[in-house]
Amino acid sequence: MKKIAIDMDEVMADFSSKHLRLFNQRFQDTLTIEDLQGTRLRQLRPHLANEITAIIDEDNFFRDLDVVEGSQEVIRELSKDYEIYITTAAMEHPTSFHGKYEWLCEHFSFISPMNYVFCGDKSIINADYLIDDNARNFAGFRGQGLLFTAPHNRDVTGYTRVNNWYEVLEFFKNDIR
Amino acid sequence: MKKIAIDMDEVMADFSSKHLRLFNQRFQDTLTIEDLQGTRLRQLRPHLANEITAIIDEDNFFRDLDVVEGSQEVIRELSKDYEIYITTAAMEHPTSFHGKYEWLCEHFSFISPMNYVFCGDKSIINADYLIDDNARNFAGFRGQGLLFTAPHNRDVTGYTRVNNWYEVLEFFKNDIR
């Protein structure tokens, strides 16, 4: 069975909405997701870069993120024909371990924890496909990368792009298993 | 650069000694490492299987394990010619995440946390070599497995075996990079 590796943040879990909401609350700002198109919060507000990172490092930041639309039904569908692995870059934020683990158990209970991978550099991942919003993770990856659209990657070119989970399903309908 | 993936427990970290010491203390037993040759604690004392697992799940069990002799100097030496990744099956014991992370940062500070991989099924690992005490992790692994001797695997055959870290160094001296 072919393996599909799937990133969490911005792909399965809606990271930006909560991050932006907490940032606006704490710093009396009024940024929107539209403002993040083609950029990142820390680039828009560089003088608050440390505070922006600190929000992510708070205990349980990752525990209650919203589930990205379509991810549950499409991943469940793909899991019939592919081995699904969740490959998330957790090592930059070790406080995220438990929140991420519990979030996956709650929202994707049909995937075994034995298929969770908390890593840093994703060139260590042995899969046929990697669905990720960070194109840098495709460097050194041995399979095919699918760039999942997120505000920050809007202008990134040179990769097969999927705009949402329904496009992911469409892509794999044409795949030779 | 070729990649070497290295397991933690029984390979870098002396898991059995602490586990056995705590077990003996709590259950007034007198088992020794010799008794574990070719078997496991839960096979020797099956009526205490749940208690044996519970010891591992205690917070900080993994935080103060002893470092396996030779691992620091040999891994540091190998890191000059190979990319080193630490690939540990943490998903069966999620309480181990922080202890394992901090232990690695303390004892192997020359390896970037970006090269830590906390996983379950190791067939997801893309490396040229995997040094591991559990032969089951070589099933589906795309590279070469090196079975690191531990009490429980004494009778396992069919793999390239390394008895200690100095034998690991010797093995890689003959490797074509």
Image (spheres, coloured by chain):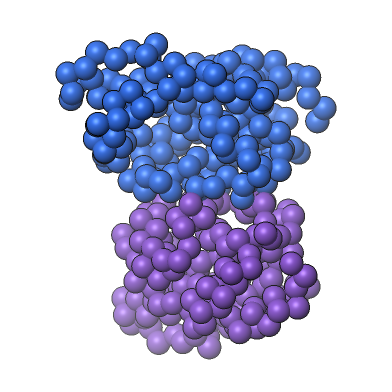
Chain colours: A blue, B purple
Q: Where residue B136 sits in the image (x, y, percent)?
A: 67, 62
Residue drawn at (31%, 59%) of the image = B59
Work out which quarter of the rendered image holds the N terminus of chain B and state it. Answer: bottom right
Residue B70 vertical position relative to residue A12 in the rendered view, above or below: below
Residue B90's place in the image compared with B169, above or below, is above
Image position of B3 with respect to A132: above or below: below
In the figure, is residue A164 to the left or right of B127?
Answer: left
Q: Where on the picture, by quarter, is residue A149? A: top right
Question: Which quadrant of the view contains residue A98?
Answer: top left
Instruction: Name the spot of residue B7 as percent of width and height, x first.
Output: 56, 65
In the displayed structure image, the side of residue A83 where residue B104 appears, left or right? left
- Tell me the residue at 67%/72% (across/down): B147
- Quarter location, residue A158: top right
Q: Nearer the viewer, residue A115 or B41?
A: A115
Residue B132 visible in the current orientation = no
Q: Tell me where residue A99 appears, x and y as whole percent.
A: 36, 39
Q: Nearer the viewer, residue B82 or A122?
A: B82
Along the line of sight, which residue is nearer the eye, A16 or B36?
A16
Q: Is residue B55 left or right of residue A108?
A: left
**Picture residue at 35% right of the left edge, 56% below the top:** B98
Residue sticking out furthest to the right: A176
Question: Can residue A26 be seen here?
Answer: yes
